Amino acid sequence: MQTRPKQRKTQHTQGAVPVGSGRTPVERRGGKRHFVRHYLEMVVAMVVGMLVLGAVTRGVLTLAGTELSASRHPELASLEMAFDMSAGMAVWMRRRGHGWASTLEMCGAMFVPALALFPLLWLDVITGDSLIALEHLVMLPLMFLAMVRRRSEYGC
């Protein structure tokens, strides 16, 4: 005579964790908090990189008797800003133990908007000053998408 294995009863309520997930609702909330904190840390690292390296770049250019302005050299200014932000973020990500693949992917999120917006600049659809603003607006969601793509690495 065969006996049927007992089925485990689970309670299905809002916030319930599936059996076998190994994570409690508190741990899952902590993961989301960690994800958001990490995102904000990377934004701060980008800003620091942009301010520090941007100041160094402008200082060196001033000593050389030239300048880099968004209105006169929008492509160069845009790429310089993306590089400065990428450098700051890459340093922070490597310090936190991220691999090169995810670090370079996140840095790519800094350059992709610029490259996508350049044709609009060349067609006079946008100005050099708006290029920088639009580039910033597109970078943040791209960073978020890169983090969602690797959510296990970023804390969720």
Image: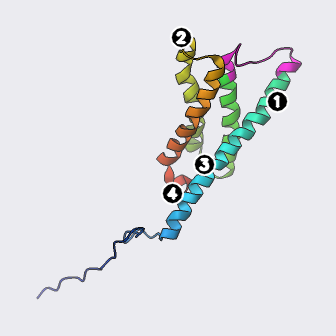
Of the two numbered discs 2 and 1 on the same chain, state the one appearing first in sequence.
Answer: 1
User: Is residue 93 something one can see in this rendering?
Assistant: no
Q: Which residue is mark 1?
A: 56
Label 3 to label 4: alpha-carbon separation? 12 Å
The residue shown at (55%, 22%) is: 117
Label 3 to label 2: alpha-carbon separation? 34 Å
Of helix, strand and loop, which one carries label 1?
Answer: helix
Q: Residues within 10 Å of mark 1 (few under 14, many from 20)?
A: few
Q: Amino acid at mark 2?
A: Leu
Q: Which residue is mark 4?
A: 156
Q: Which residues are magenta?
A: 61-77
Applied colour scheme: rainbow
The residue shown at (66%, 21%) is: 129
Q: Which residue is mark 3?
A: 39
Give the image quarter of residue 62.
top right
Q: Position of residue 53 (x, y in %)?
A: 77, 33
Image height check: is 32 above or below 102? below
Q: Which residue is mark 2?
A: 123
